[in-house]
Image (spheres, rainbow, N blue to C red):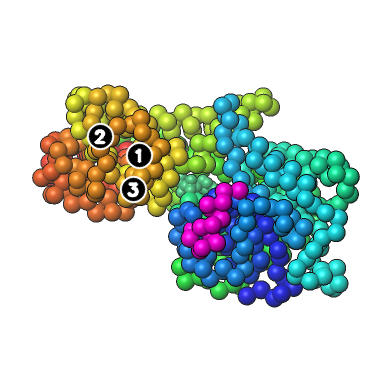
Amino acid sequence: MLNTDKILNISIVGTGYVGLTTGVSLAYLGHRVTCVDTNPDVITRLKEKIPTIYEEGLQELLHTSYDNLEFSTTLKDHVNSSDVIFICVGTPTKDNGDADTKGVEAVAWEIGEYLEKKRERPNGDSASGGTDSIDSTPVVVNKSTVPVGTQERVRSVIEKRLKERNIDVTFYTASVPEFLREGVAILDTLYPDRIVIGTDYKQAEDTLERLYKPLLDQDFKEPDAIKRPPDYSVPAFIKTDPRSAELVKYAANAFLPMKISFINEIANLAEKLGADIDQVAHGIGADSRISASFLGAGVGWGGSCFGKDTRALLYTANEYGEELGLVRQARKTNYAQRLLMVHKLQQALNIIRGKTIAVLGLSFKPGTDDLRDSPAIDIIDKLLELGAFIKAYDPKAMDNFKQEHPELQIDYTQDEYFALEGAHALMLVTDWPQFKELDFDVAKQKMKEFVVVDGRNIFDKEKLESKGFVYRGVGR
Ligand code: UDX
């Protein structure tokens, strides 16, 4: 696909959502990629072409790009042959809310440990080329979400280790934040809105521009499984300094949840005023300055990024004496929204103790089995505390829920109708497409009382009310 002189050698450390999607996508574009993970089971499975996470199109890309891919449990043998080394390891939340960069720094240390003066470039001798030749100086790119300034720490850790080894070798550092959404990670990687590159080195910028050229020009053949969206053209290419790039990531992951929390606050008001939030969202979303996306009112946001990143941003802000009151309030509104769902149920049922509640949806959004910061956890926890019995169904996330939340005693059912058997109310938490098709005539035969709390505004309120259901949505 790529001319040989355009192919880069890439190492990617960490094969989670970000690392694996990036690796497989870059291999699909024609680069030679080694994915590194210390977990031998993960590497064994990937070598056997078995995806270790579920993502649409991942399986296909893994197969079609397999010749460009290598998998390894150690970075050691790949440091000196890599043009670009991506750090894509986890940055879990510390007790104080800050992001823990231990993993990132451990990879930096390894790079400093193994980087040699004399480097091998299996692609051929880059130094011999003309203006188009590849600068063989390696670029260490951080893609993990890290506090602002981490790139400087990564640089220091590598330099320190090289100094201890008495080795003088040039390398560049850069920050390239990741914006992919779970479930559509390959789509977001191949057809991004923007690519942001934060580095102080012109040469690193050139190498990364070369790396992303197929994405910037969109001249690659689209994979069958992940078609180019019809209205898509090319991404914005944003070159900036490392600190700004790091802050872009946090600012994006604070602005989007703020937008959702805003619409939820307006929804709660709309409900009291007798207005309809769907109409209001439509009305404001048509303003191109506001835009229609992320104005879906409901139970609120969850997932691996929004909660964690807003918390880490507040931690940083606090360290520098800034309040970031909007972000703080967005979080407060979001977590209160979950309990508001329980409150709506309480009002409709009068008493929750002893009642059976059918909870539909456990994952934080449809299309994934991920339960991180899922609204369902808080809602179920509260309902159990209030003395309810819970029957729950989720098309993908039940095994994870059983494993990760053994403390929450619930009955798992084989489909949504089994969950409704003998239930006094239905609590919709995740907007899986199949739930939108629920047959309420059948539901009515199965349920004991006919209360529906629609945490994602997916059901037809009037239709349900005409069938004799008590319907509670959000802002309707
Ligand atoms: C998010 C960002 O979108 C992505 O750019 C970043 O890199 C990681 O975090 P993700 O967590 O995969 O991605 O999910 P996303 O699709 O953005 O949804 C986040 C949450 O917001 C979900 O719980 C979803 O249900 C909720 N949501 C989304 C709403 O409640 N209303 C909306 O209108 C949109």
Residue at the spot 79% in from the left edge and 52% down from the top edge: 115
Rendered residue at 51%/57% (across/down): 45
Between tags 1 and 3, which lies in front? Answer: 1
Q: Alpha-carbon neighbours of circle 1 within 10 Å: few (<14), some, or many (≥20)?
A: some
Picture residue at 57% right of the left edge, 68% below the top:
66
Q: Residue 50 in magenta?
A: yes
Mark carried by residue 441: none
Q: Amino acid at mark 3?
A: Asp
Nearest the viewer among 161 and 233 is: 161
Earlier in the chain: of badge 1 and badge 3, it is 1
Q: Which residues are magenta?
A: 38-51
Numbered tag placed on residue 431 in the rendering: 3
Q: Label 2 amino acid?
A: Ile
Q: Quadrant of residue 312?
A: top right
**For residue 376, side relative to residue 144 (left or right):** left
Q: Position of residue 142 (x, y in %)?
A: 68, 48
Horizontal relation, residue 73 to residue 55: left or right: right
Residue 187 in percent (x, y) is at: 51, 60
Front-most of residues 373 and 81: 81
User: In the figure, 16 relative to 381: above or below?
Assistant: below
The disc label shown at residue 390, or none:
2
The percent coordinates of residue 117 (x first, y second) are 86, 55
Q: Quadrant of residue 195?
A: bottom right
Q: Is residue 423 magenta?
A: no
Q: Nearer the viewer, mark 2 or mark 1?
A: 1
Helix, strand, or loop for circle 1?
helix
Q: Which mark is residue 402?
A: 1
Vertical comparison of 282 with 345: above or below: below
Q: Quick check: is the Cβ at mark 3 less than 8 Å away from ligand 1?
A: yes
The residues bearing labels 3 and 2 have C-alpha atoms spaced at a distance of 19 Å
